[in-house]
Image (spheres, coloured by chain):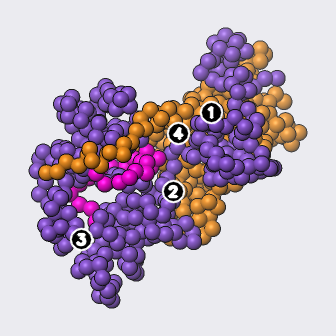
Chain colours: A purple, B orange
Amino acid sequence: MQITFTSFPSQSGLRSAYASATKHATEDDEDAYMDVEPFDDFESDSSRLTCPGETLTSAQSFMRGHGTYVDNDDVISSVAGTVERVNKLITVRALRTRYNPEVGDLVIGRITEVQPRRWKVDANSRQDAVLMLSSVNLPGGVQRRKLESDELQMRNFFEEGDLLVAEVQAFFSDGAMSLHTRSLKYGKLRNGQLVTVPPILVRRLKSHFFSLPSGVDLILGLNGYIWVSKHVKESEREGEEGFDAEAVYSNRNDDIDDATRTAIARVTNIIRILAAHSVPLTDVVLLEAYEWAVEQDADVKGLLQEDVSDALVAAVTSG
Amino acid sequence: MSSRIEILNDGGFRSDGRRQYELREMTFDMAEQAGADGSASVAHGLTQVRVSVFGPREAKMRSQTIHDRANINVEVGIAPFSTGDRRKRSKGDKRILEFASTIKSTFEPVIQTALYPRSQIDIFVHVLQQDGGVLQACINATTLALANAGVPLLDFVCAVTGGVHAAAPMLDLTTLEENDLPHVTVAVMPRTGRVTLVSMETRLHVDRFEEILRLAGQAGGVIHKEMRAVVRERTKGLVDAMGAGVRTSDFAEDAMVADS
C-alpha cells in the first residue's frame, strides 16, 4: 500500500506521477532532512536551518536555549530558523517573530493606555511595555519632583496614540518590559512618519539616531519601528540654546516644507522596499539606497514599482 | 444507486480519478500578508483556506489573560461563496464556534504557551473554497501560519480525513464523498506520532476505526514531508535575502551627519 498524491486529475499512472512531481519532496529529500548526527561539524556549516519538531542533538551533551525544548534526552527545535551554538548552548533563532527585548535597547512605541502612575506602550513585543511616570522627564528640569498634580495630568504628557522613543530599563517578573525616557534624546515623537519592519532586520548599531542629507532624521527602533522625521538643527538640539523645552511634550508639528515631506516619503518607501526584500537595515545601506534613489531621479511613488525596487535592492546589496 | 455517482468504481478509481489512498494536490503558500505576524494559505484540491496569526501580543480584553500562559483565540470566517449553495453564516453561528474551538483545542497542547504569560495569540481562519476536508486544511494552514509567525511549536500538526466505502478505506475525501461516507479527521504530530485531534461527525463502525486511524497517521507523515519542505524553502529564502545585505561601517556617523 502506498499513500500518494498527484496533481488533480492524475495524469498517468500513480507511481510515475509521484516520482516526476519535482516540486514535491521526494524520498531522497527525506533522507537529507533526517540527518540527526551530533553537532561536531557545526562550525563548517554556520547557518543550519531547522523546523519545529526536528531533533537537533542529544540533551546529554548540550544545553537547550531559546527556540528549543527537551524530550526524551533529545534537544528539539520548536521554531523554524537558524541553529546557533555557543559552546554547549544550542539556540534556534526564528526569522519572523515579535520583538524580544533586552535591557538597554532603544525602542519606539505607541501609547495604548493611561493607567495610574504609568502608561502602557505598544512596542511590538509579546506584551505591552510599561512606562512609569517616575521614568519620564517632566518639563521643568531633570531634578523636578513628581507631584500629585502630575499624576492627575498625565494625559498632558502622553496621550493614547502618541509615539515615543525610549530605552528598555528593566523587566517585570512576567517578562513585560519597563521603559524610560530619562534622557534628552528620548521622548515624544513628532514631525515625521512611522514605518514598521520585521524586528530582525534592525541590528544593534553604535547609534540608532542618524540624519540623511536633505533634512531627514531617522530613528531605528530595535523593535522594528522606525521613525522618519524632519531634521532637527544642531543648534536646536537638546541642551543647546535654541532648544525649546516647552515643545518636548507638544502635540503640534512644526512647519514642514514640501521638499522635506517628499524626502521623508522617499525614505519611508525605501525602508518598505528593503524590508519587503528582507535586507537588514543599517546606516550604510540606507544612505546608499537613498543616494541611489536620488541619482535615479525616480519619483517617490515610482520607487515602489517592482522593477525599480528590484534594481534598488540589487544596487544596495551588490556593493 | 444507479443514478448516483459511484464512490469507488470496479477499477478502483474514485469519482475524481484518484485511487483509494491517493491525496489531492496540495499547495502551501507562506507568503507574507501585510500586517500579520504570520500567514499561510493551503489548498487541498479545491478546498482553499487562508490563516493569519497575530501575536503573541497584549490581550485585548483583560478578562482573557491567563497569568501563567498565553491565551489562544481562534476565529473562523466561512466565505458565503465558498460552497455550492451560497449561504451567509453569522459570526455567532454555533457550528462555526464549535469548529473554532476544535482548532483551538488541537493547537493548545502543541503551542508552547507557557513561554508567553499574559499574552494572546490570535488565529484568524478564512475558508475560501470548500470541497471536503475543510478541517484538515484549516489545521494544516494554521500550523504553517504559526511556524511562519515564529510561535514555538512542539511539532508540526498534520491533519487528514479518512473514510470508509464498503469496507474499503479512503483518504482525503471530497464533499461528494464526505456526504455519503462515514469519515473521521485525524491530526497527528509526526515526530512522536501523537494524535492531537480525532473528529468524527458521522457513525463509523468500530472495526474500521483502527484501520482508518492508522492510515490517517501515515498520510499525516506524507503531508508533513511536504509542509516541512515548504517551511525550509521559505526559511532558506529569508536567510539568503538577509545574508546578502549585511554591511555596517564604524565611520557611519561621520559620513552621515549633514549639517544644515
Provide the residue designation for mark 1: A45
Label ID, residue A100 = 2
Q: Position of residue A92 (x, y in %)?
A: 61, 46
Label 4 marks a residue whose chain is: B
Provide the residue designation for mark 3: A249
Which amino acid, by three-letter code, is at mark 3?
Tyr
Secondary structure type for disc 2: loop
User: In the rendered image of this protein, does residue A142 appear above or below residue A183?
Assistant: below
Which amino acid, by three-letter code, is at mark 1?
Asp
Residue at 19% in and 54% down: A231
Secondary structure type for disc 3: helix
Is circle 1 on the same chain as circle 3? yes
Label 2 marks a residue whose chain is: A
Secondary structure type for disc 4: strand
Left or right of B52 on screen, residue A248: left
Number of the front mark, 2 or 1: 1
